[in-house]
């Protein structure tokens, strides 16, 4: 009995020891598996982060090369550290660069994509015609289909056929500002109104008996205040830098043409600075010159006899074509279009913007002269003069004309679009790139 009890106690102790060891081994195994799993997760997190930063290195290297105009290939790769590699693709699309970078570390992959775009300047054109102190003249059958705001006098040839279909605002000095011989479709705001037809209300200090007001008269109304033109010379100079590819260290030689430039049918131009005159080819309506970037001309911009100037297809923004000689704004920097010239904007909303800084106020030799069926069938593009007279006559049509002084005659017409309130213009690659999107993709 004693021997049997000892054997039973020994077996129990052995069983308990085995049980304890089994539990210890089970706990140890579980802990080991847990630690291994955590280590694996940690390694994967580290690899994933390394793959992300590898892809990011590829993006940043590409952005640097694009912005600094360094050499790069559309498809390339970048070694990162000893194990990482980024596979990069760069696609150009409507003045945008789409950069895709695939970062890989030990078969772990992360993909990033960024989109760069050239800087866009938004210019607001709130009126069909906005004029500075030089004022507005409307001749026979000339009209503005929209509103007018002028810091100078607004005068017409006849209240029967010199027409503004929207509102007319005449600002400036009390002793000199007036609206005379104009047919206005809506309200008029002016110090003095004479010999005109007002379709709605009139706000004034002085009005004569020859004026008809269809709406309500508001005598003793305050004079409208002057408004600045929407484009400054500083803005023009920024666009000029873009035209000559100046990213901060001066104009680049490859973006400068010295001497007069006579384009031929089908040419593309921009960004480009021409140190001389720029002439567009005649009879190019079937094969127009394409504007692919900003253009700066120090002499004159000339087009005639069925010349066609077209903005690059597919653009939601436009380019400026500038006539400006900073050293001689008295003689240079003029624009002249005549005899069936056509300017074509983009179907996507981009507009051509023709700018002159010439100071001439001579109607026989103005800063900008547009006549004889320019855009006769469809109003196109925007015209701007910083300091001189714009003269438009003989069946010429534009979407917007803004400048120091404006003379419209003989069926000249401005047809304003509401979309011009937010018009975008680019100075092109020379003006710099900016990141507009930075995302991770699958």
Image (cartoon, grey):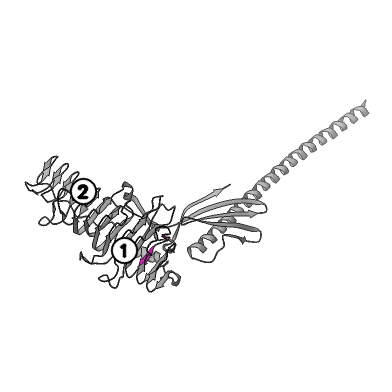
Q: How far across and how far down the image is residue 263, in percent?
A: 40, 67
Which residue is identified by label 2?
164
Q: How far across and how far down the image is residue 21, in percent?
A: 80, 38
Which residue is identified by label 1?
234
Query: Seen in the image, is 164 located left or right of residue 13?
Result: left
Q: How many marks?
A: 2
Q: Nearer the viewer, residue 315 or 183?
A: 183
| Circle on res. 294 | none
Pick the quarter of the image with the N terminus: top right
Of callouts 1 and 2, the N-terminal one: 2
Decide: few, some or many residues near mark 1? Use Cα within 10 Å; few <14, some 14-19, many ≥20. Answer: few
Q: How far across and how far down the image is residue 133, in percent?
A: 19, 59
Query: Seen in the image, is 129 located left or right of residue 52?
Result: left
Classify mark 1: helix, strand or loop.
Answer: helix
Residue found at the very far top of the displayed protein: 1
Query: Seen in the image, is 181 located left or right of residue 239?
Result: left
Q: Nearer the viewer, residue 131 or 411?
A: 411
Residue visible at 75% across and 41% down?
A: 29
Is label 1 in contact with label 2 (beta carbons under 8 Å)?
no
Classify mark 2: helix, strand or loop.
Answer: strand
Residue span colored magenta: 284-296
* Residue 285 sits inside the magenta stretch: yes
Residue 249 visible somewhere in the drawing: no
Residue found at the very far left of the displayed protein: 209
Instruction: State how far apart marks 1 and 2 are (Cα).
Output: 31 Å
Q: How far across and how far down the image is residue 20, in percent?
A: 78, 36
Residue visible at 67% across and 53% down?
A: 106
Q: Quadrant of residue 74?
A: bottom right
* Residue 142 sits inside the magenta stretch: no
């Amino acid at each position: 009995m004693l021997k049997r009890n000892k054997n039973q106690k020994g077996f129990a102790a052995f069983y308990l020891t085995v049980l304890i060891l089994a539990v210890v081994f089970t706990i140890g195994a579980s802990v080991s598996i847990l630690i291994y799993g955590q280590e694996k997760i940690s390694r994967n997190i580290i690899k994933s982060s390394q793959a992300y930063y590898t892809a990011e290195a590829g993006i940043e290297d590409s952005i640097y090369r694009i912005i600094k105009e360094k050499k790069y290939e559309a498809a390339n790769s970048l070694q990162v550290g000893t194990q990482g590699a980024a596979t990069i693709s760069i696609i150009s699309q409507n003045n945008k660069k789409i950069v895709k970078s695939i970062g890989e570390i030990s078969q772990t992959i992360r993909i990033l994509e960024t989109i760069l775009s050239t800087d866009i300047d938004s210019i607001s054109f709130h009126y069909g015609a906005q004029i500075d102190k030089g004022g507005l003249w409307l001749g026979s059958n000339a009209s503005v289909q929209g509103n007018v705001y002028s810091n100078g006098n607004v005068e017409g040839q006849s209240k029967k056929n010199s027409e503004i279909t929207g509102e007319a605002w005449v600002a400036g000095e009390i002793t000199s500002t007036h609206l005379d011989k104009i047919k206005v479709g809506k309200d008029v705001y002016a110090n003095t109104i004479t010999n005109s037809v007002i379709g709605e209300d009139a706000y004034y200090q002085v009005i004569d008996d020859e004026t008809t007001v269809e709406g309500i008269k508001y005598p003793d109304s305050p004079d409208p205040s002057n408004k600045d033109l929407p484009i400054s010379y500083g803005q023009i100079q920024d666009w000029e830098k873009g035209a000559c590819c100046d990213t901060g260290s001066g104009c680049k030689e490859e973006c400068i043409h010295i001497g007069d430039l006579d384009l031929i049918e089908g040419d593309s131009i921009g960004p480009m600075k021409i140190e001389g005159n720029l002439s567009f080819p005649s009879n190019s309506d079937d094969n127009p010159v394409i504007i692919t970037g900003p253009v700066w001309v120090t002499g004159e911009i000339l087009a005639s006899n069925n010349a066609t100037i077209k903005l690059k297809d597919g653009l939601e923004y436009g380019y400026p074509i500038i006539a400006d000689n900073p050293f001689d704004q008295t003689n240079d920097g003029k624009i002249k279009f005549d005899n069936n010239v056509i300017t074509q904007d983009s179907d996507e909303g981009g507009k051509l913007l023709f700018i002159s800084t010439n100071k001439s106020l001579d109607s026989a030799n103005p800063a900008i002269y547009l006549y004889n069926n320019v855009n006769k069938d469809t109003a196109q593009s925007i015209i701007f003069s910083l300091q001189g007279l714009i003269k438009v006559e003989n069946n010429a049509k534009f979407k917007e004309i803004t400048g120091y002084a404006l003379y419209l005659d003989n069926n000249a017409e401005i047809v304003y679009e509401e979309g011009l309130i937010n018009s975008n213009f680019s100075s092109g690659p020379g003006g710099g790139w900016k990141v507009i999107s930075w995302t991770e993709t699958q």
